[in-house]
């Protein structure tokens, strides 16, 4: 392993490490635009120039590999002057439109100008005019004048999405990013080009002009869009409801996780956040015939407890693979072990969607694996047998957690079956055909409004924290089950979701033996539990 000195500090790094990364390990920030750890090195922005002893000219730190005995300096007068000149060059044709640019507040040109530029402008002449507000596809818009030609977006479409829509045309200061004239930027990962663009050249059509970046707060979570479980940053605002519609979640960005999604997320996950605010069930509802009325939690929970007091054989419980490991475990404990109810069923994947060989999985649920490991196999035959019993009037009622019972494929469950029941209870966050027919509807929190864990298709358990408070009158499944346990005198020994996970660790295969401190947003792989030490993956929520 080469040992080198950077700004007088020694560091040993694995062979092949770039100087820019070695410096980062020491906490030394070398500015850059075109470098991205997930893409090949282009070395064209020249912002990361450093001095290396015995080399006559400045070298780009993104390209230079760390060598044994190397002595690097990143903060000399020569380097400071060079950075100023590079910035002056990059900004020579850049419009000064920060007040109307959507990137303001998170623009690397702004940031580096304040940190490394601060020169007096020597420009009086007109700037080169280029194409503005070019719609590249359904998600991204281009302002060519703001582009610094770092080529990150081109490399993304060449190396990651492998769709090759973007390129650079023309020469000198007339060079600009363009799209294949016969195509649109509509690949399944198109939103990532906005993340990699360090300036305001590529902006997100969904987010554009919604809110200034500095009004956003954020929290890390795990995407529930499919069985991969990509790590995400949920960016929200609680004070300035967007266009008066009360939306809190403003956008979703990928969070780096080496084992799951690296730096990327798919567009489905990125733009699928609106259900946190839209079409939400806001208060508990009790329905009698065609009349539905909002009711108080206490009364409605007693009503549900009363329904559960009847014959346990005549009740069916449907759980969703959208629920967390902890919730599935509690549901199993409450209904199977507590109430001795024999009819527990796992709802099938919401939709059998598209899959690719990168991130997107056909199973559009985040926790099918967790459900399977906790003893909830998906069994359409058993569901159909239960549906036949319902049709014959042999079932009193059902409790449905989280998903639309009527969207199930491969079973004979339909609305005529539901109509045969004396009652049905829907516990979920959003309206659907089942909630619209249920005699009792209990609003529950979405995954950003609670803590818990998902087990992805590879068996990686990822724990996440609450980012937002549950909307309006929603409660978590944990709270709902705790209240029902109290009413039905069923033991409930947990104070928090964390307690449930601790119990899972102690008693539930294959969660058994998972060291708590080592489980983070990086995910612990249950397949390597035999190994004595599972290194925790550092989760900084970096968006590069
Ligand atoms: Fe770089 Fe953005 Fe220009 Fe693409 S559009 S080359 S990412 S500055």
Image: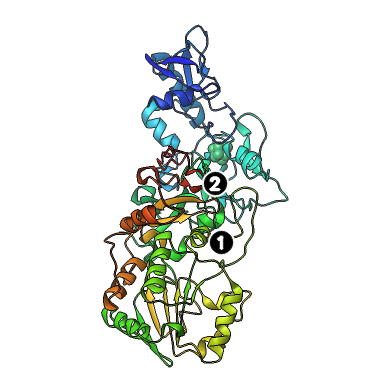
Image label count: 2
Could you classify mark 2 by the number of other residues whose Cα lies within 10 Å: few (under 14), some (14-19), or many (20 or more)?
many
Q: For this rendering, which residue is in front, 50 or 201?
A: 50
Looking at the image, is 368 positioned above or below residue 394? above
Residue at 53% over, 31% down: 35
Could you classify mark 1 by the number of other residues whose Cα lies within 10 Å: few (under 14), some (14-19), or many (20 or more)?
many
Which colour assignment does the render follow? rainbow
* Label 1 beta carbon less than 8 Å to ligand 1: no
* Label 2 beta carbon less than 8 Å to ligand 1: no
Residue at 31% over, 61% down: 469
Residue 105, percent from left and from top: 39, 43
Task: Specify whether residue 118 is in view.
Answer: no
Q: Is residue 92 left or right of residue 214?
A: right
Mark 1 → mark 2, Cα distance in angstroms: 20 Å
Residue 241, percent from left and from top: 35, 62
Q: Which residue has dot 1 on it? A: 364
Residue 433, percent from left and from top: 51, 79
Residue at 48% over, 64% down: 322
The quarter of the picture showing ligand 1: top right
Q: For this rendering, which residue is in front, 95 or 253?
A: 253
Which quarter of the picture shows residue 147?
Answer: top right
Q: Is residue 309 left or right of residue 391?
A: left
> Mark number for residue 104?
none
Q: For this rendering, which residue is in front, 422 or 213?
A: 422
> Mark number for residue 192?
2
Looking at the image, is 378 positioned above or below residue 386? above
Task: Specify whether residue 307 is in view.
Answer: yes
Q: Is residue 348 left or right of residue 257?
A: right
Residue 468, percent from left and from top: 34, 59
């Amino acid at each position: 392993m080469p040992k080198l000195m950077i700004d007088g500090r020694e560091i040993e790094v694995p062979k092949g490490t770039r100087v820019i990364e070695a410096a980062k390990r020491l906490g030394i920030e070398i500015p850059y635009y075109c470098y991205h750890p997930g893409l090949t090195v282009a070395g064209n922005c020249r912002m990361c120039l450093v001095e290396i002893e015995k080399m006559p000219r400045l070298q780009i730190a993104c390209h230079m590999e760390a060598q044994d005995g190397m002595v690097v300096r990143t903060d000399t007068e020569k380097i400071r002057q060079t950075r100023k000149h590079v910035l002056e060059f990059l900004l020579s044709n850049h419009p000064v439109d920060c007040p109307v640019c959507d990137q303001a507040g998170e623009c690397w040109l702004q940031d580096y100008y304040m940190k490394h530029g601060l020169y007096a402008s020597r420009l009086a002449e007109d700037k080169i005019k280029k194409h503005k507000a070019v719609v590249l596809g359904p998600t991204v818009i281009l302002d060519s004048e703001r582009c610094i030609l770092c080529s990150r977006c081109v490399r993304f479409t060449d190396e990651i999405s492998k769709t090759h829509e973007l390129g650079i045309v023309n020469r000198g200061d007339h060079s600009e990013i363009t799209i294949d004239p016969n195509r649109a930027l509509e690949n399944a990962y198109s939103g990532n080009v906005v993340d990699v663009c360090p300036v305001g050249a590529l902006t997100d059509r969904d987010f554009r002009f919604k809110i200034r970046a500095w009004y956003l707060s954020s929290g890390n979570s795990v995407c529930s869009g499919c069985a991969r479980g990509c790590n995400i940053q949920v960016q929200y605002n609680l004070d300035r409801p967007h266009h008066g519609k009360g939306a809190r979640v403003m956008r979703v960005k990928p969070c780096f996780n080496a084992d799951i999604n690296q730096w990327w997320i798919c567009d489905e996950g990125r733009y699928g956040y609106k259900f946190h605010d839209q079409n939400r069930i806001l208060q508990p509802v009790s329905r009698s015939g065609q009349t539905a009325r909002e009711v108080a939690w206490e009364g409605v929970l007693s009503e549900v407890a009363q329904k559960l007091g009847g014959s346990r054989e005549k009740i069916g419980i449907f759980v969703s693979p959208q629920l967390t490991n902890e919730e599935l475990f509690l549901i199993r404990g409450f209904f199977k072990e507590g109430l001795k109810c024999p009819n527990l069923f796992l709802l099938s994947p919401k939709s059998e969607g598209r899959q690719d060989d990168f991130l997107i999985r056909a199973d559009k649920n985040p926790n099918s694996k967790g459900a399977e490991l906790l003893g909830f196999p998906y069994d359409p035959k058993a569901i159909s047998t239960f549906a036949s019993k319902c049709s014959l009037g042999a079932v009193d009622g059902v409790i449905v957690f989280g998903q639309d019972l009527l969207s199930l494929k491969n079973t004979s469950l339909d609305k005529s079956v539901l109509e045969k029941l004396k009652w049905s209870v829907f516990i979920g966050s959003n309206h659907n055909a089942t909630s619209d027919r249920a005699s009792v509807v209990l609003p529950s929190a979405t995954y950003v409004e609670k803590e818990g864990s998902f087990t992805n298709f590879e068996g990686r358990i990822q724990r996440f924290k609450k980012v937002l408070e549950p909307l309006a009158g929603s409660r978590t499944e944990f709270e709902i089950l705790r209240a029902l346990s109290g009413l039905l005198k069923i033991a409930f020994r947990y104070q928090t979701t964390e307690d449930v996970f601790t119990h899972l660790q102690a008693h539930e295969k294959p969660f058994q033996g998972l060291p708590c401190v080592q489980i983070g947003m990086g995910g612990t792989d249950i397949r390597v539990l035999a190994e004595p030490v599972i290194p925790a993956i550092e989760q900084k929520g970096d968006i590069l």
